Amino acid sequence: MTRRDEIAENLLLVQQRISLAATKANRNLDDVTLIAVTKSFPSSDVEILKSLGISNFGENRDSDAAPKALEIEATWHFQGQIQSNKLKSITSWAHVIHSLDDAKHFEIIEKVAIHPLEIFCQVSLDGAQGRGGVSGDELYELASMVQESPTHQLMGVMAVAPLGMPPAKAFAQLEEIQKDFITRFPKANKISAGMSGDFEEAIAFGATHIRVGSSILGSR
Ligand SMILES: *Cc1c(COP(=O)(O)O)cnc(C)c1O
């Protein structure tokens, strides 16, 4: 089996799972964007996915992502932990940032970004901050900052299900947080949630952007 056949087969299975989850949740398939997470995989895999119709790619590490994004035209998403000193580079290749969780980082983005970015605020669902994210007032302060920017666009909330918490419980919690969030930020109604192991649950609770790596490309 060629790498292309392998990826094509995996992708088809993922697309079928998305479709089934959307149907079950009574949601329109067009309202769920699949982001293929290509971190640690070579740009040849990105090319294969592009030829199979995928146009959104997600990365976690600037050093790994920047060369790929430079080489391949697509919509590039950054979803990893942000380091201040990497923001100049990240904002040069990324179009969407999913993992903003620090006002200081947004101040830097406003200074260094050379093009407008779409931004999700990362929410912490267990308060432990182990996997990043903010909650409560901090979330609203951060989102207000982005909303007030004349350049960048606040998209909505992002979360990763905490380790040890059932995904359905995590995403139900995120949905509740988002209901309140959109009363304050009505246009920022997107939800970035769900990975290979839990994207069906995320779709059930309203995810509009799912970030799927290993189910498509194999284990890292
Ligand atoms: C790696 C990663 C993903 C993709 O995870 P898979 O389990 O490979 O699908 C999604 N979101 C974030 C934030 C990640 O770090």
Image: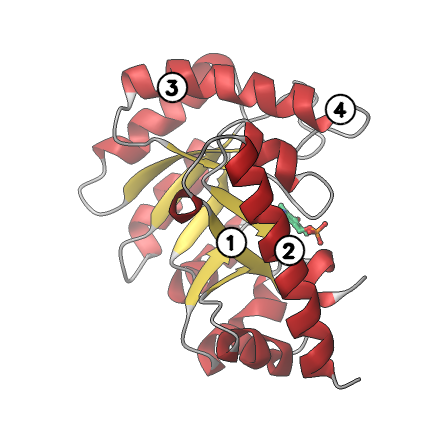
Q: Which mark is residue 14?
A: 2
- Point out the tag, 4 or 3, that comes first from the N-terminus: 4
Instruction: Name the residue that disc number 4 marks.
Output: 166
Q: Which mark is residue 34?
A: 1
Q: Is residue 166 left or right of residue 17?
A: right
Instruction: Name the residue that disc number 3 marks.
Output: 181
Residue 199 visible? The answer is yes
- Point out the tag, 4 or 1, that comes first from the N-terminus: 1
Query: Could you say whether the residue bearing mark 4 is in a helix, strand or loop?
Result: loop
- Asked if the residue at tag 1 contacts the one at tag 2, i.e. Cβ–Cβ closer than 8 Å, the answer is yes
- Point out the tag, 1 or 3, that comes first from the N-terminus: 1
48 w.r.t. 155: above or below: below
**The residue at label 1 has a CB less than 8 Å from ligand 1:** no
Query: Could you say whether the residue bearing mark 2 is in a helix, strand or loop?
Result: helix
- Asked if the residue at tag 2 contacts the one at tag 4, i.e. Cβ–Cβ closer than 8 Å, the answer is no
208 w.r.t. 36: above or below: above
Residue 59 visible? The answer is no
Bin the neighbour count of mark 2 within 10 Å (Cα to Cα): few under 14, some 14-19, many 20 and up. Answer: some
Residue under the image location 44 percent in, 21 percent down = 178
- Point out the tag, 3 or 2, that comes first from the N-terminus: 2
Q: Which mark is residue 171?
A: none
Q: Amino acid at mark 3?
A: Phe
